[in-house]
């Protein structure tokens, strides 16, 4: 069919859908009049005309479903539509839990391998183990099914049963398990440990409904271990629930300090202040951010920075400062509509610039930063055209999108070679780590921590096994490049094996041993007490 002939129809239906969105939004708020008015009859009539008289059969509901994301994309990069079938999964990270059987699995060569059984979860209670292969769910084989299809079969309402058939390499016969589904927590504090005798480290991956409690629990453990200062790692944290971020920031600020405020065309300014009940008001703190730290991570960083409460270390953050309000439709689908903007205490708008309808350019911003050298040199961040603001102590900070750190730590490209790039592109670190861990599970289960495991890997020359493995997979041995990248290859390889054997705590602890940003954070605390006012001025 000629697309030019359909164009007027597409435009007309798009306009109709846009008005329908306004209708549903206003209908949910009694303070706003019905924006449809008498024109609703015309809209109904036109839809009926298309449905009844158009030359071809038209699936009106499907047209609406397909058009909604496109309409919202014309507003801003963060107004989104979530179909009913995807809404539960979309909210799980925010809620901090889901209902399932309590395993982490990996699909390899059409087989589902149990990588980790969550302690105390439903699968742990019936005896599932890491290394098990799940071959059937219910009475149906899942061999060859995609991960999404397997997840749908394993998840289900709380208290319902699911039967699985498992192959365990140590046993000859298949084993049957009946598992009672339950709530499975999604951890948002990936690591929490003492990085020195007096400095604690906490890695937060998201801001869910459970993150505040997780943070308080972690801080209590650190204080028990004589923690006197804290590094909070928000790198790659895309954000989450605003109210949770505010509670967490409140722990570090004295009474009456502005944390953040929001304001929009139809949303009056709303200020959020600290209440003075925080448990860490006197504890030195350093916040780590990078180009993937967004939204709530930027609110956290901006509040700490603008109140001169701690030092921000790393790379310029993402720049996501738009507030979304969820609006549910009768069919269970949801629109998350931008209704306001976030502002830091100094008045900076966190949101970076965007062109309406050009989300592709917006999404490629990180690549542009890379190409312009911003990830490697602070001088590439041009501040001349940015609006200046002042912190509580009079330090200059800049608006224009994202949080610029107090101390810039460039990405280290030393050791990056074309050989290492090929290993990453082919995903060989993770695939080798999986096969190695699965093959040596009995030996690896004897180790209690990553230090013992690293000693084992060194002793058995796993690096050489990996180079041979890569050669068999098409990344040919290149000794000069291998020597140049040796430290990074070993770091990535060992980290992948540590993650498969243990979890995020040991994984982060190992990587932090060579992380320059973490090392700088420790130095800032030891030399300046984490106080940004004491940092050398350029």
Image: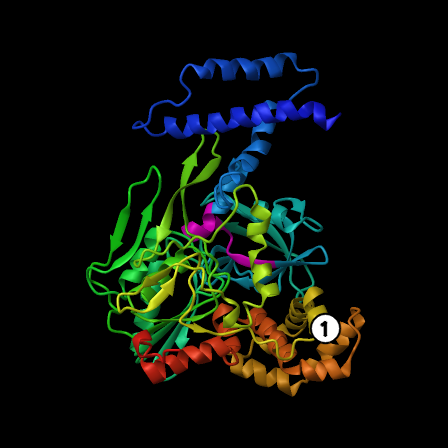
Q: Is residue 96 magenta?
A: yes
Q: Residue 227, relative to residue 189: is it above or below?
A: below
* Quadrant, the N terminus: top right
Q: Residue at x 65, y 67 (%)?
A: 430
Does residue 4 appear left or right of residue 180 in this picture?
right
Does residue 1 appear left or right of residue 89 in this picture?
right
Q: Position of residue 326 (x, y in %)?
A: 41, 40
Q: Residue 290, relative to residue 144: is it above or below?
A: below
Query: Label 1 belongs to which residue?
Result: 418
Q: Is residue 305 magenta?
A: no
Q: Residue at x 32, y 61 (%)?
A: 248
Residue farthest to the front, as pictured: 384
Q: Nearer the viewer, residue 95 or 156?
A: 95
* Quadrant, the C terminus: bottom left
Residue numbers of the magenta segment = 91-105
Q: Secondary structure at mark 1?
A: helix
Q: Position of residue 377 (x, y in %)?
A: 53, 72
Residue 140 lies in what quarter of the image? Answer: top right
What colour scheme does the image use?
rainbow
Does residue 109 appear left or right of residue 388 in this picture?
right
Q: Is residue 280 visible?
A: yes
Q: Is residue 442 visible?
A: no
């Amino acid at each position: 069919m000629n697309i030019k002939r359909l164009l007027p129809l597409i435009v007309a239906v798009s306009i109709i859908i846009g008005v329908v969105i306004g209708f549903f939004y206003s209908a949910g708020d009694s303070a706003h009049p019905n924006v449809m008015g008498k024109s609703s009859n015309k809209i109904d009539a036109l839809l009926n005309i298309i449905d009844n008289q158009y030359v071809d059969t038209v699936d009106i509901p499907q047209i609406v479903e397909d058009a909604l994301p496109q309409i919202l994309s014309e507003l801003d990069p963060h107004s989104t539509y979530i179909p009913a079938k995807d809404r539960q999964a979309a909210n799980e990270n925010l809620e901090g839990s889901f209902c399932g059987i309590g395993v982490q699995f990996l699909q390899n060569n059409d087989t589902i391998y149990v990588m980790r059984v969550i302690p105390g979860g439903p699968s742990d209670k019936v005896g599932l183990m890491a290394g098990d292969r799940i071959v059937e769910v219910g009475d149906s084989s899942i061999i060859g099914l995609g991960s999404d299809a397997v997840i749908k079969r394993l998840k289900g309402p709380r208290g319902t049963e699911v039967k699985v058939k498992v192959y365990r390499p140590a046993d000859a016969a298949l084993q049957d398990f009946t598992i009672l589904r339950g709530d499975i927590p999604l951890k948002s504090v990936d690591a929490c440990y003492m990085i020195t005798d007096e400095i604690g480290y906490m890695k937060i991956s998201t801001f869910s409904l459970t993150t505040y409690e997780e943070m308080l629990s972690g801080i209590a453990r650190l204080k028990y271990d004589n923690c006197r200062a804290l590094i909070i790692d928000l790198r790659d944290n895309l954000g989450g629930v605003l109210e949770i971020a505010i509670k967490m920031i409140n722990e570090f600020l004295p009474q009456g300090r502005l944390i953040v405020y929001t304001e929009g065309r139809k949303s009056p300014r709303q200020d959020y202040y600290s209440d003075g009940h925080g448990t860490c008001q006197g504890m030195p703190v350093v916040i780590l951010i990078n180009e993937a730290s967004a939204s709530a991570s930027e609110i956290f960083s901006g509040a700490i920075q603008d109140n001169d409460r701690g030092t921000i270390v790393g790379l310029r953050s993402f720049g996501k400062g738009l507030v979304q309000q969820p609006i549910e439709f009768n069919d269970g689908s949801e629109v998350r509509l931008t209704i306001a903007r976030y502002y830091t205490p100094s008045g900076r708008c966190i949101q970076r610039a965007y062109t309406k309808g050009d989300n592709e350019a917006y999404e490629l911003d990180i690549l542009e930063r890379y190409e312009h050298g911003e990830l490697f040199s602070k001088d590439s961040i041009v501040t001349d055209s940015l609006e200046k603001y002042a912190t509580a102590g009079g330090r200059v900070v800049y608006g224009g999108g994202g949080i610029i750190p107090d101390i810039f730590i460039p990405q280290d490209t030393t050791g990056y070679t074309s050989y290492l790039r090929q290993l990453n592109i082919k995903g060989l670190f993770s695939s080798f780590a999986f096969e190695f861990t699965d093959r040596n599970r009995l030996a690896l289960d004897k180790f209690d921590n990553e230090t013992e495991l690293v000693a084992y890997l060194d002793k058995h020359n796993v690096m050489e096994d990996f180079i041979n493995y890569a050669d068999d997979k098409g990344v040919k041995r290149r000794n000069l490049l291998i020597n140049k990248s040796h430290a990074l290859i070993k770091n990535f390889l060992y980290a992948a094996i540590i993650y498969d054997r243990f979890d995020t705590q040991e994984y982060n602890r190992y990587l932090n041993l060579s992380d320059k940003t973490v090392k700088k954070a420790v130095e800032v605390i030891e030399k300046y007490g984490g106080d940004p006012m004491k940092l050398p001025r350029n």
